[in-house]
Amino acid sequence: MPFLSITELNKALLGQLKTEKERAKYLLQFEITVRLTSENYQTILKAKIGDIDLPITGNDESSVITAARIFLQQQAA
């Protein structure tokens, strides 16, 4: 299933959702990517949707994206 790219309108709609569960369900339809970041003097990958950072980090792009999707699924349950 292809995922959508998040837009400013999508972010505005996200901001109107009241609970973490609603926000997680909404975010699951969008593409999760990673960005390089630095924490404690180490370079790591951090999951993100558009410019929204998710609290998932790691060293391997595939595993970070998978973990982020699992995290959102758990939040949406």
Image: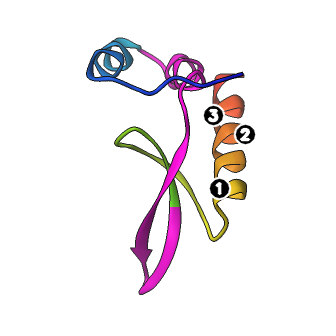
**Where in the figure is residue 52, as x and y percent of width and height?**
38, 40
Q: Residue at x 64, y 30 (%)?
A: 75
Q: Which residue is mark 2?
A: 70
**Where in the figure is residue 64, as x and y percent of width and height?**
65, 55
**Where in the figure is residue 72, as x and y percent of width and height?**
63, 34
Mark-to-mark CA distance, 1 and 3: 12 Å
Q: Which residues are magenta?
A: 18-45
Residue 27 is covered by the magenta coloring: yes
Mark-to-mark CA distance, 2 and 3: 5 Å
**Left or right: 65 in relation to 26:** right
The quarter of the picture where the N terminus appears is: top right
Q: Which residue is mark 3?
A: 72
Image: 45 above or below 50: below
Q: Earlier in the sequence, mark 1 or mark 3?
A: 1
Q: Residues within 10 Å of mark 1 (few under 14, many from 20)?
A: many
**Left or right: 61 in relation to 20:** right
The quarter of the picture where the C terminus appears is: top right
Disc 3 is placed on an element classified as helix
The number of numbered badges drawn on the structure is 3
Q: Residues within 10 Å of mark 2 (few under 14, many from 20)?
A: few
Q: Which residue is mark 1?
A: 64
Disc 2 is placed on an element classified as helix
Q: Earlier in the sequence, mark 2 or mark 1?
A: 1
Quarter of the figure with residue 74: top right
**Disc 3 residue type (three-letter):** Leu
